[in-house]
Image: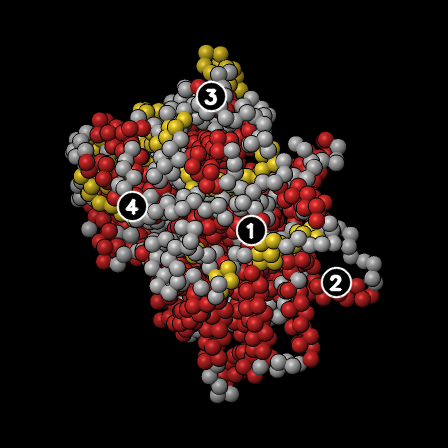
Amino acid sequence: MDAIILQILNGLDKGSAYALIALGLTLIFGTLGVVNFAHGALFMIGAFCAVTMQRILTLSYETIDATKTDFLGNALKVKTPYVESWFGPEMGASIIDWAVPLAILFSIPIMLLVGYVMERGLIKHFYKRPHADQILVTFGLAIVLQELIKHYYGANPIPTGAPDAFKGSFDFGTLLGFDPNTVIYPYWRMVYFAFAAVIIGAVFAFLQFTTFGMVVRAGMADRETVGLLGINIDKRFTIMFGLAAAVAGLAGVMYAPINSPNYHMGMDFLVLSFVVVVVGGMGSLPGAVLAGFMLGILESFASMNWIKDIVPGIDQIIIYLVAIIILLTRPRGLMGRKGVMED
Amino acid sequence: MLGLSKKDTKFLFIVIALTAATPILLQPFPEGSAMSQFNAGYPDLMQRFAIFGIFAIGFNILFGLTGYLSFGHAAFLGVGSYSAVWMFKLLSMNVLPGIILAIIVSGLFALVIGYVSLRRSGIYFSILTLAFAQMSFNLAYSVLTPITNGETGLQVTLNDPRILGQQVAANGNVPPTNFFGLEMGSSLKIPVGGWEFTFNAGYYFCAVIAILAFYLSLRIFRSPFGLMLRAIKTNQTRLNYTGLNSRPYTLAAFVISGMYAGLAGGLLASMDPLAGAERMQWTASGEVVLMTILGGVGTMMGPILGAGFIKYFENIFSKINENVLHQWFSFLPDGLEGFVIWVAEHFVGSGWHLTSGVLFMMVVIFLPGGLVEGGQRIGKKLKRKKSDGDGDDAEHHPKQSPHVAE
Amino acid sequence: MSNSNLTRRGVLKSGAVAGAGVALPTIFTASSAAAYTNEPMGGSVTLGFNVPQTGPYADEGADELRAYQLAVEHLNGEGDGGMMNTFSSKALKGNGILGKKVEFVTGDTQTKSDAARASAKSMIEKDGAVMITGGSSSGVAIAVQGLCQEAGVIFMAGLTHSNDTTGKDKKANGFRHFFNAYMSGAALAPVLAARYGTDRKAYHLTADYTWGWTQEESIVASTEALGWETVNTVKTPLAATDFSSYITPVLQTDADVLVLNHYGGNMVNSLTNAVQFGLREKQVNGRDFEIVVPLFSRLMARGAGENIKGILGSTNWHWSLTDEGTQAFVKSFGTKYGFPPSQAAHTTYCQTLLYADACERAGTFNPCGVGEALEGFEFDGLGNGKTTYRAEDHQCFKDVLVVRGKENPTSEFDLLEVVEVTPAAQVTYDPDHPMFTGGALGECNAG
C-alpha cells in the first residue's frame, strides 16, 4: 500500500512536468494551428534561466590566498561572490541559495520576450504553410537554441539546487498511520506539483473568465469569423504564444532542482510531450492535462518491481503502449475533437 | 522505353550517368589542397549517399504520394539491418541472402505496424508509428539484447556458424562481406593529376540497387496505383464516398516504403556488418522526414538530394577542426585570422549540429518546395541571365553539384 | 603549424604523380599496394581521434581532444614534453613517430555505434589514418574496435569501462588502457567492507544496457564474496531522466546500501534523486544508509553538485596524485588549458604515447608489429605506477583508485579525494575468468 501511495506521488510529479509542457503545446497548436517542435527548447531555456540566475548571483571577484595552492602549485585564487561582499556572507549566501525561486521572476519577462520574438520573427510566416514545413523550421530552431546553450554552458548537467528550506522530505506516512520514514516525499517535488496545479488553474481561469480568454477561445473555434467581427485576433495570438512560452519556461525553472539542467533536456521531453498531447486529443487543453498526469502515473506504476518481474522491460515502453491502446480505442485521443489534424 | 515516357527515360539516364560518375564528381579538389576537406568521394560516404537515397525514395512513396507522415520509419531500417547481420552470422557473408531477408522481414514488420497504424490518419497516425518505433528501439537496446546485442550493436564474430560460407578467413579474421566473391570493401584507386579517384565495389553495388529502386519508384509514381495514392492525399473522404476502400492502397504503399527502408538497412549492414539500435531511434526516423522535406516532398529527385545534403554535413562538417581552420585562414593577418576562426568554429567540428539547424531553417524559409525548388529557381535564372549566381556560393557549397550526382 | 601538404595522401600523391606521369593512371587495389592499411609513405603519419563532440558526453569528448592535441605536441617535440619525460620507455625522441611528423584528424562519434563507425571509416578511407583512438562509452568502443580489426588498423580505446571490451568482444587490433568493471568491484569491495561492515544489504539500480549489466555483475560478485547480501537489482531505462519511481521502492526494503550502476547523465540524475529522497539521512537497523557510485567521473560528478560529498567510488586516475608522471601531466595540461585534466584526458593521452612508443620499438607502423610490441609491455611513469599490457586480452593492469566525494572542496575541480590506491595485484584476474570468456582475440589484421 505504501509503495502504491509513493508511486502515485511520483506519477503526479512527473505528470506535472508533462502536463505543463503539453498545455503550452496545445495552447500554441489550438490557437495558432502550429506544430511547435521548439517547445522542448523553451522548457530547456526556462531551466537555464535558473542556471543563469545562479551564475549572476555567484559572480565573483578573486582574492589570492597565499597559504593554499591550486592544482599547479600556484597560490590559490579564492572566489568571493559580490553579493556576499555587499550583503555580508550570511545574507549573501542565502540570496544565492534562493536562486531558483528568484529565477521565476527573472524568467517570466525573458520567456515572454523569447515567445514574442519567435512568433513575430518566425512562426507568423508559417501559419499558412503545411504542417511539415512548420515541423522542419521549428525543429531547426530547436537545434539552434540547444546548440547555443551548449556553447555557453557546456554539455554536462549543471547543479541547480533548491533553497535549503526545501531540502529534505516530508513524512506523509505518519499522517496516514504508516511507520515513520516509509512514506516520505521531498519538499521540492511537492512544491513542483503545487506550482503546476496553480499554473494550470490560472491558465484555465484566464481563458474561461476573462474577455481576452473568451476571444481567444472563440478564435480557436473559428478564426475567420472572429476576424470578421473586427477583432484583431493576430495580436491576441501573439500574446498567447508568449504565454505558452512562459508556461514552458516556468515548468523548466522549477524543474531545475529536480534534475540538473543540461542542453538536451528539451529534446528528451519533446517526443514524450507530443505523445501526451496526442493521447489527450489534439487541441484539447483538459485532454493534455489529463493525459499528462495519467501517463506520469502509469509510467511510475510500470517501474514497480513486481510489475517488471511479470513483464520485463514494461517500464521502457509503457508510455508508447498506452498511447497505441488509447489511439486505437478512442480515435481522437481522450478528448480530441473531430477533424483536427486528421489530414 | 522501359515503360517510361520519353522525358522520364531521359531523366533516368541522367541519374544513371551521374551515379556512375559520382566517385569523380565528389572529388572536386586535388588531394592535399586546403579544400580537400570538402571531398566526399570516399567509399563509406558514397555508400551512405546511395543507401540513404534509397531510404528517402521509399519514404517519399508513402509521404509524398499519400500524405501519411510516418514518424517511425527508422524501425524498418533497423529491422532490415538486424536481419541481414543475422544472415551473415548464420548463413554466409554473401550479401544477397541478407538483403533478401532484410526486405522480407521489414515488409512483414511494416504489414503489421501499417495494418494497425493506418486505422488512424493525420497526426494520430504519426504518433502511432512513432510509438511502435520507439518501443522497438527501447526493447532492442535493453530486453532484446540476446537478439540485438543492445548498446554495442549486433556484430559478426569468429564463433558464428556461417553454415554455407567460411567461418574464419585465411588471415584468421571474420571474412569480409561479398557478392559471390566480389568483396564489398575492395576498391580501385586511380590517381589522375593531383586527384585520386576511388571506385569502390560496395558503392557500385549500392548504386545499381539504388537505380533499380529509383526506377521502380518512378514506375509507381506514374502508375494508376500512384494516381490512386495521390487521390487519397487530395481528398480521402471523397474517395471513400465513391465506394472505394482506400485502406488496401495505403497499406500497400506503407509496406512498399517499409521494404525500401529494410533494403536500405540490409545494404547498410552489407557495407559494414554492424547493426546498432540507434538506427531505430526517433531521431533517425526524424532524419528521413527532414531529408524528404528538405529535398522536396513528392518530387522524384528531392529526397535523394535531401539525403545527400544531411549525410554530407554530418560526415564532412563534423571533421573540420581548429587545425584545419588555421590552415585555411593562415593567409589572413593575425587578429583577423583569430576572429574568423572564432566565428567559423561555431559552425564546424562540434558545432556541425548548429550548421545543420541553421540550414534547415534557411531552406524551409526561403525555399518552401525544398532543394528541388531551389534548383529550379537557379535553373530559371541561369536561362535568363547566364553570368549570375556563383558569388558567395563557391566557398560554402562546393558540394552542390555532387549532390545532384546522387 | 606548417601549412604545406599535410595529409599522408597529399605527399603520396605528389610522389606517385611525379613517378608515373600525369596521363598514365596507375591502378592498384587497396590490399595489394601497401604492406598494410594506410602505410605512411611521406614525412608524416596521421592518427584518427574519434571522440563524442555532440550529445551528452560532448564535454568529456572535448577534454579527450585536448589531451590528444597535447600528446601530439609532445610527440612532435613541442611544449614541455609532459609525461614523455617520466615514461619508463625512452624510445620516443620528440621527433614525431619513427621520424615522421604526427598529424591528426578528428571526428564525432555522437556516442552512437553507427555514427562512430562512419566517422572512423572516413578517417581510414579518406584521411589515411593508421590508428584510431577515443570514445566515451563501451558500446562505441566495442563497435569501433570491431571496425578497426576488419580494416587492419590499431584501435587504442579511450574511456570504456565494460568488461566486454577486453572480454567477450576483445580483438587482436584493439588495446585498452582504462580499467574495467571487474577491477572497480575488486578495488571497491574491500574498502566498502572496511568502512561499512561486512553484513550490509545492497540494492542495485542498473542502467539497462551492456555496460550496466557487467558492472552490476562485478560489484555483486565482489561484495557478496565479502559477506554482503544483495536485496534486489533493478534495471532502469537508459532514457530515464527522473529516477524517483526507482528510488522510492528502496524505502520499502531493509536495504542499507544503494549501488548506482549509472554513468554520465543517468548517474547525475539518479544520485540527485536519491539524495532528494533523504537516503543520505536515512537510518536502517541503526546504521547510516550509504550510497555507492562504482564508476566516478569528475567531469560528470560536477553535475551532481554537493550530492557527491562523502560518496565512494572508483576511478582510473585523478589529477591530485603525487607521482611524478601525474605531476608532469597536470602541469603540462594545466598550463596549456587552465584547468586540470580529467581521467578521460589522462587515458587518451597515455594511449597516444603508448602507441607511439610501440611503433618506435617495433620500428614499423604495421599493426601486427605494433601489437606485438604492446603485448606484455611493462611500463611506469604514466601516472598509474607499474603497469602491464597483458598479452592475452590487451588489457592494462595497474593500480585502481578508490575515491570519495570531497567534503570541503577548495575549487570547482577539487571534487574527489583519493581514499585508497588498490594495488594492481588485487584487481588482476585470470584471462579465462568467467566474466570475460566467450570471445577470442583472433589474429592481428594488417589489412
Residue C198 x/y as whole percent: 18, 31
Point 29% across, 52% down: residue: A303
Q: Secondary structure at mark 4?
A: loop
Q: For the residue marked with disc 3, what is the amino acid?
A: Thr
Mark 1 vs 4, N-terminal side: 1
* Tag 3 near tag 2, CB within 8 Å: no
Mark 3 vs 1, N-terminal side: 1
Q: Secondary structure at mark 2?
A: helix
* Label 2: few (<14), some (14–19) or many (≥20) C-alpha neighbours in 10 Å: some
Q: Rounded to the nearest whole Å, what is the CA distance between mark 3 and mark 2?
A: 62 Å
Q: Which residue is mark 3?
A: C86
Task: Tell us which disc is closer to us: 3 or 1.
Answer: 1
Q: Rounded to the nearest whole Å, what is the CA distance between mark 1 and mark 2?
A: 45 Å
Point 52% across, 71% down: residue: B62
* Label 4: few (<14), some (14–19) or many (≥20) C-alpha neighbours in 10 Å: some
Q: For the residue marked with disc 2, what is the amino acid?
A: Ile
Q: For the residue marked with disc 1, what is the amino acid?
A: Ser
Q: Secondary structure at mark 1?
A: helix
